[in-house]
């Protein structure tokens, strides 16, 4: 397998995450730097992939901890283990809010049944007396679509005989180089 | 479901990760703070869980980037999405090397076929001219078993009708409280 072949496979698997809700890349794990300086991780839903520009999108609630964390430290990690092709995809991202006009366009595409994910009361992570003491609500101001510029993509392919590891970086057009696994 | 019930389920699923290599918690995602200040994530193998003391273990190569990152910032995150019970488990960890005597005891239990994971030449992440230009080697000095004290466990259960989110913290004996999802 060549560097180009491996890179192409990773992008195809990521793109599949947007198209196919059963694919591994549909629900990557987002790693951020927490306010206390440690690291945090949680599942997000991959919403868009643009291979040509090496950009991704996911959405969050503006009142969530990760929105606050990303505002303070926009360098995040994204992780996918795609068991089907035995490929670990690790992305280093630079995350920023979509410009207002594009954010509005995204909001219009969010189905009515999904809109209550943005605007719950109390806000995500706030204490509750009982598990069910929250109300779903729709608040377009709370909808925060995030754009992720892929700075680097590190791949680890667990082949039957060989482990292949490679790093692709934006600064040289994702040309790629092999690393020791 | 009570706080205690939810907490118990999460610990059972984590313990299952050690016993059953096909369970979700076998391969959690570890989030660390990278040397550039951003966040990184990669798969690790869960090696031990002690529920009573709320401690976990995983192993790495001392020459790996994550070993260096954890030495600098020992506050890490661990993430499991257990689809079978629709439970997201997020742990905040304080990570430290096992004392030498215990590390030696762990090494003796590593099967011969797994030992080449610790000691490859060149070291993990070093550049290679070709994907296969590395040699598996066994170097007990490179074996680094890590102990993770669980500082907090945040759970999100995606029930059919209700999302339940709860936070359990070491400082109050993991008593737990509900949070807005």
Image (cartoon, coloured by chain):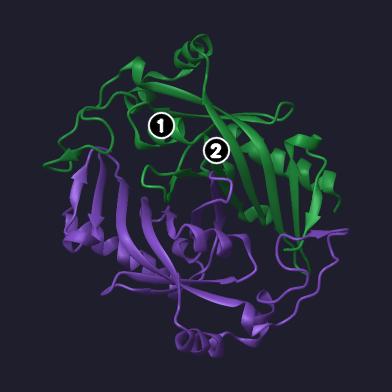
Chain colours: A purple, B green
The residue singled out by tag 1 in the image is: B67
What residue appears at the point 38 percent right and 73 percent down from the top-left corner?
Answer: A49
Across and down, in percent, residue A10 comes to 31, 61
Marks 1,2: beta carbons within 8 A: no
- Mark 1 or mark 2, earlier in chain: 1
Name the image quarter holding residue A121: bottom right
Viewer-nearest residue: A155 or A85: A155
Q: Helix, strand or loop at disc 1?
A: helix
Q: Eyeballing the image, is A83 above or below A159?
A: below
Badge 1 and badge 2 in a common chain: yes
Element at label 2: strand
Near-viewer residue (B97 or B18): B97
Task: Return the x and y of residue B153 as percentages of the image width and height.
Answer: 68, 44
Residue A88: x and y, percent? 37, 51
- Badge 2 density bin: few <14, some 14–19, many ≥20, Cα 10 Å: many
Figure check: A43 above or below B98: below
Which residue is pictured at 55% across the width and 75% down the height?
A144
Q: Is residue B39 left or right of residue A40?
A: left
Give the quadrant of the C terminus of chain A.
top left
Q: Viewer-proximal residue, A82 or B148?
A: B148
From the image, tell me which residue sits under label 2.
B75
Which mark is nearer the camera, 1 or 2?
A: 2
Query: How far is disc 1 from disc 2 in space, using C-alphas?
Result: 12 Å
* Count of number-bearing discs: 2
Question: Subunit of mark 1?
Answer: B
Which residue: 39% across, 70% down?
A56
Relative to B73, is B53 above or below? above
**Outermost residue toward the front in this view:** A72
Residue at 17%, 60% in the rendered image: A172
**Could you tell me residue B130's position as x and y percent?**
13, 43
């Amino acid at each position: 397998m060549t560097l180009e072949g491996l890179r192409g496979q990773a992008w195809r698997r990521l793109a599949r995450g947007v198209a196919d809700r059963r694919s591994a890349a549909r629900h990557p794990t987002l790693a951020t730097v927490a306010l206390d300086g440690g690291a945090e991780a949680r599942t997000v839903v991959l919403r868009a992939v643009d291979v040509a520009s090496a950009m991704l999108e996911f959405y969050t609630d503006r009142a969530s901890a990760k929105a606050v964390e990303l505002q303070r430290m926009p360098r995040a990690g994204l992780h996918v283990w795609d068991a089907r092709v035995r490929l670990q995809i690790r992305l280093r991202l630079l995350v920023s809010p979509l410009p207002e006009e594009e954010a509005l366009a995204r909001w219009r595409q969010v189905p009515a049944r999904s809109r209550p994910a943005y605007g719950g009361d109390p806000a995500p992570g706030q204490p509750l007396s009982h598990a069910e003491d929250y109300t779903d609500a729709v608040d377009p101001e709370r909808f925060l679509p995030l754009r992720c510029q892929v700075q680097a993509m590190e791949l680890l392919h667990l082949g039957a005989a060989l482990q292949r590891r490679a790093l692709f970086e934006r600064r040289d057009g994702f040309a790629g180089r092999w690393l020791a696994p």
